[in-house]
Each structure stands twice: as C-alpha cells, then as structure tokens.
Amino acid sequence: MCSYWDCLFFQHSLSPKTSEAYNEQATFFSMHDLVHDLAISLLGNQILDQSRQGNTRGSICQYALLRDCSRPLEKCLTSPARLIALHFVDSWGRLSGAAFAPSRSLRALDLRECSIRKLPDAIGQMKQLRYLNAPEIQNKMVPECITNLPNLIYLNLHGSNFSALPKSIGKLKNLMHLDLSNCSGIYELPDSFRNLENLAHLDLSHCTGIPGVSESLQSLRRLKHLNLSSCRMIGDVGELRGLTELEYMNLSCVCCSGIQQVLVNLTKLKYLNLQDILDNVLLGEAWFDSLLECISSLSNLEYLNLASNDNLCAIPKTIGNLRILNTLDLSFCRNLQRLPASVSAINSLKFLHVSGCSKLDNSTLPQNKNISVLVPHFVGDGESSRNLSELEDKHPTLLEIVSRLENVKSAEGAKRIKLAEKQSIERLKLAWTRDAMRFVDDREILSELVPPDTLEALSLKGYNSICFPSWLMSIATYLPLLKIVLMDDLPTCSVLPPLGQLPYLESLSIGGMNNIKKIDWSFYGGRRAFPQLQHFSLSHMGCLEEWNVAYTSGEDGLNEFAFPKLNTFSLERCPLLRFKAWLPPGWYMYIDNSDQVLLSSWENRGHVSASSTATKLLKVTCCEAPLHQWSLLRHLPCLEHLEISGCSHLTCSSTDLLQGTSSLETLIVEDCKNDVVALPETLKQIKVINCNGIKTLPESIQQLSDVSKFMAVPNMWRCRRG
C-alpha cells in the first residue's frame, strides 16, 4: 500500500477543499485490514477494490484498487471521469495508458506494483494529477510529457533505469516531493532543475553518476529534506550553505570537506547523517574536531550519525549543548577512545550506539539509566563478557546480534529475555557455532526466541535441528515487515519456511542446507509468492535436485509464476540442480560450480516464458561442462551480456548454442583454456582476459563493430572449485 506518510505529506500541500478529499484517499491507501473493511462499509460504492471484491464491472466510484494495469479503465468503471485516486495492487500485465487515461480528473496515481517498461504519454493528459508514484521504470528516458502536469506535487521515480531527466522538468513549479533514489544511470541534472523552487523533499541517494549536484541545488531554498547518500561526485558541499530551511540532511558516503561552512547556517536541522565520510582518514583528526564544534551549535538536532569514521578519536564536551538530541550513533568509529561526561547530561538522549568501537574506554560510557547504550553483541550463557541474560532489560533499536547460542543451558533462559516484546528491534541475527556441543536442542531455543513483529531483517546461522518451530513455519503472520532474510549453514534441516508469503521481502539468501532436495509449493506458501523480492541467492546446496519455479495453485490447476520483481539471481555450488521447465526471472543471473543448471533444457511449447525473457546478463564461473552442451542458453532469447570465467571446453561450431543467442552483444572470456571458434553475428564487443590457452580468435571477429581485446591481463576473478 501507499505509505501513510507520503500521503500525509501530499495532503498538507493541497488547498483546503482538495485536502479534505485527499485525506479520504490517503487513509484508503494506507489502512490496515480492519480499517479497510470499515471504510468500504462507510463509503460504499465510492470505493472499488478488486483485490478483495473481484472484478466488479459497472462500478461508479472515486477511489479504485485495480489488479490489471494493461486493461482499459472503461471495462472496470462506468464513469472513469469521476475517479480521484487509482492504485494498482499485485498488478499483472504491462502498464498501458488506457488503464488510467480516460480519468482526466485523477489526482493520485500509484503504479508502484506495476511492471513499467515505459511511462505512457497519456500521463501528460492528467492535468489535475498531484500525486504520481511510478518507481522502477525500465526505459532509458522519462517522457517529456511528464512536465505538462502543472499541479503535480509528489513524484516518485525511485530505482528507474533512465539516463536523463526531461530538460524542461523545471516547469513543475508546484513540485514539493521528488524521489530519484537509486536512479544510478542519471548522468546530469538539467539546467531547469534549479527552477523547482518549491521542492521541500529531495532524495538523490545512490545517484552515483551525477557530477556537481551541489551547484544544481543551491537555489532550492525551501528544501527541508535532502538525501545525497552515496552521491560520490557531489561537488563543492559549500554550495549547500543557502539551504537554511533544512531539517533532514543525509551526506553519508559523501566527500564533505566543506561541510563546516554549511552547518553554521542550518539552525533548523534535526537529522544529520555523516556516516562513513569519504576520505575521512585524509581529513585528519583536527578536521573532525572542527566539525564536531560546528555540530555542537545545532541546538535543534535530534539525530546525529557519525558512524564508520576512523579518524574520529574523541568527542568534545560541547556535545552536551545538544539538549534535545535523542540518538547518537558512533558505531564502528574504530579509533574513538573516550566520551565526555557531558553526554550523560543530555536528558533527551535515549540511544547511544557504540558497537565496533574497539578502542573505546567503557568507563566513559554514560551512567544515565535513561540512556540505552547499544553494544549489540550478546552471546549465550557461559560467556562472561556479554551474557544472553543481559538482554532481559535491554531494548536495542537498530541491531541485535545473539551468537554462540549453543552455550544456552536451558530454554527457560531464552524465554526470560522476552524477545517478542522488544518492539524497537529492526535487525536480528541468531547464530550457533558449527559442530559445537549443545546443552539444549536448537529447536527448543529457537522456539523461545520469537522476534518482535517490527523486525525487518533476520539472519539465522548454524541452526542444527531437522525442522523449525511453529513461528518460523508461519513467518508471514509473526514477522510481516521482513525485508531481508539470510539462512546459512543449516546442515540437517529438511524443510524451508513459506517465505514466499512475506509481503515486503526484498532480499533472500539461503545456503548450506544440504538436506534440502526439492524446492516446491511449500516454499511459496500460496499464491502470488515473493511479490517484492529483488535479490535471491542459493549457495552450497549439495543435494538440491529439483526446483519448480512455476507451481500449480488453485482449483483451476493453472501454473502461476513467483518472483514478479526479481532483479538478480545467484546460484553457487548446487551441483545436482537442473531446471525442468522455467527459470527464476532475474535480469542478472550468476551461476558458479553448478554444471547441471547449464545443461537444463525443456520444450518451449510454442511460447517463451517471462522468466526467460527477463534475463539480460549471465555470468558463469568454474564450469567443466563443454560450451556446446549449455542448453540453458537456448532459453535465454534476450541475453545481451555473457561473461565466462574459469571454464573449460569453450569450443563450439557455428551451428551450436553461442550462435543461437540472437540478442548477445557483449562476450567476456576470462581465465579460460580453449579457443572460441564461433561468435554470434549480433556481437558488438568481446574481451579476452588472462586466457593463455586461447591462441587464435575466429575470423568472424573482423565483423564486430566495436572490438576490445585484452590479452594476458592479470587475473581479476579467482576460480574456486571444491
């Protein structure tokens, strides 16, 4: 659902009349199930919700949750012109302009759950549109028509693949919220960007290719929220000194050599993140002393993050001037030696993070009982340094690691910490030492360590029981907010939890589960599995033989595909696994020491599955199977980039598989021993790195339009087999 805070931000930007109407749709987009049902009962036919009510034709409504973003809107609604807010939920099909264009009065359009190859030009006709959420656009260009939305206030293009913004983006005079985070392909901001003078919220985090960002922002004097995290070519930070309205500023992983002259003017700043400042070692200890003196004058500061700065050795006593500071993060400042007594005098301070501060004198830690000092590494009973029992009265916020759980002598000891009640925990790691002696069965311990339902990241390592406790087998009910799951080194476990039903899961890594032979419907847990998963890794699954990527579900018996948003798929050391029908639909696929996967083949039966067309980049390392047997390549018709490293027997004839990859443009061969005989006609670039066994290249190389040859380059990827 649309974020409540996004909607609230947008609501306050509207006129009083439209604000009241938007308040209804904001509530509708963000409500929980119970409130959702109540709203439907009160608003009646003003709401159409296909996700619950099915496809109700002929509906007259103002707010709609629809399922099919490729279907014309007229087939769902009798009066599309009345529609105010439209959100596509668990949408199938490719976005079509006909799915929303007839509703010229639309004010809010949420496309976050659609597959957007290109933003339809029909967007430009929505003159009343104020809220547009359209992340992860695959096309290289944003259509110029988006600048024809004079009333647009909120625009989210997070994670899109485009290389440039429209040159006339400055026409969006009313724009207040712009999210371009993770749009790493953008190489410049147009000159008109400086005309967005009403911007209050700007997120350019991880836009790593834009030079001179600071210069483009200096005229945005109304900015309150600015995130430039990992913008490595930000330019002169001093250009930001005119942004005096800033309340939130994130400059983590940014070169901040001129930050002092900026901070002097930011008297309204509440949140400051200077984690892992680039070149912080070169800046020197004296520079950090000067920086901290400037920070100490920010009287409205509530959150300060200085983590991972190795040249931060001491905190000045003037830090006590930050009278309303709530959180101070100094984690992994490895040379930090002591804290001043003035830290204890900050009555508002609730959380102090000092994990990874190996040189810190613990006697200087504040004694104020109201301050939760987070040194987030706890071990099982029997270790004198940090006992599991110490967690009983601790309420950590960002990270809690519990390791060496084999030392816990009773399940009661695990139960006493009441982990489920520690609602502030967001990330949790539970670990046992491999092959260590246990006092209690791992399943008994894990049964008592039920995490809080606020958890966003869970890591489970070294678990040695055959099955999981009930809370893990109903994980979507207990941990509905999980985004990251890592399960590693579980040698005897013979089942997988139904992770597919986690609605927000984005990253999943499973490894070292040698007792798993089959991945099937129980892993998916039901229909529409893994709706948000983007990164999936399987490793060291020595007995895994079968994986049904498409699974049968429902009374109709039809195949249904999981992983609709998968981006990267990694498969390492799964020697027995062979796909029999379909592949996970990742844009990037990595295969290492898994020869049988490359030998996978099946009949297409007249069509090419979406999973096959998704893969554009394939990297194969340490394979012994000859290239002419790699049947998997036949099922990757859209493959553009192929990397082969540490493999043998690359020889194949012109009629074989390499010629069959009709879309292949780039071939990289590294640390290989044999000649490559035939190249695809579509190939534009070939790189040969550290391949002393290759004596000749095929005659067809003369036909390539862009040939780059790197012969006998030192090894950059070490093949590891075993």
Image (cartoon, rainbow, N blue to C red):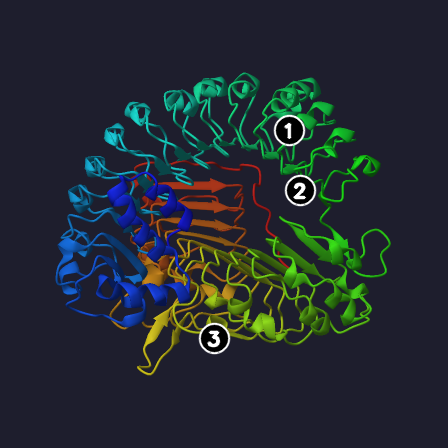
Could you tell whether 332 is left or right of 438 in the image? left
The residue carrying mark 1 is 322
Residue nearest the observer in this picture, 185 or 361: 361
Name the residue located 75 percent from the left edge and 31 percent from the top edge: 335
Looking at the image, is mark 1 or mark 3 earlier in the sequence?
1
Q: Is residue 197 above or below residue 25?
A: above
Residue 707: image location, x then y, percent: 36, 37
Could you tell whether 223 is left or right of 491 in the image? left
Q: Tag 2, which secondary structure?
A: loop
Alpha carbons under labels 1 and 3: distance apart? 55 Å
Residue 664: image location, x then y, percent: 33, 49
Q: Nearer the viewer, mark 1 or mark 3?
A: 1
Label 2: how many Cα within 10 Å (few below 14, some 14–19, many 20+): some
Alpha carbons under labels 2 and 3: distance apart? 46 Å
Residue type beneath disc 2: Lys
The picture quadrant where one finds residue 456 is bottom right
Name the residue located 55 percent from the left edge and 18 percent from the top edge: 264
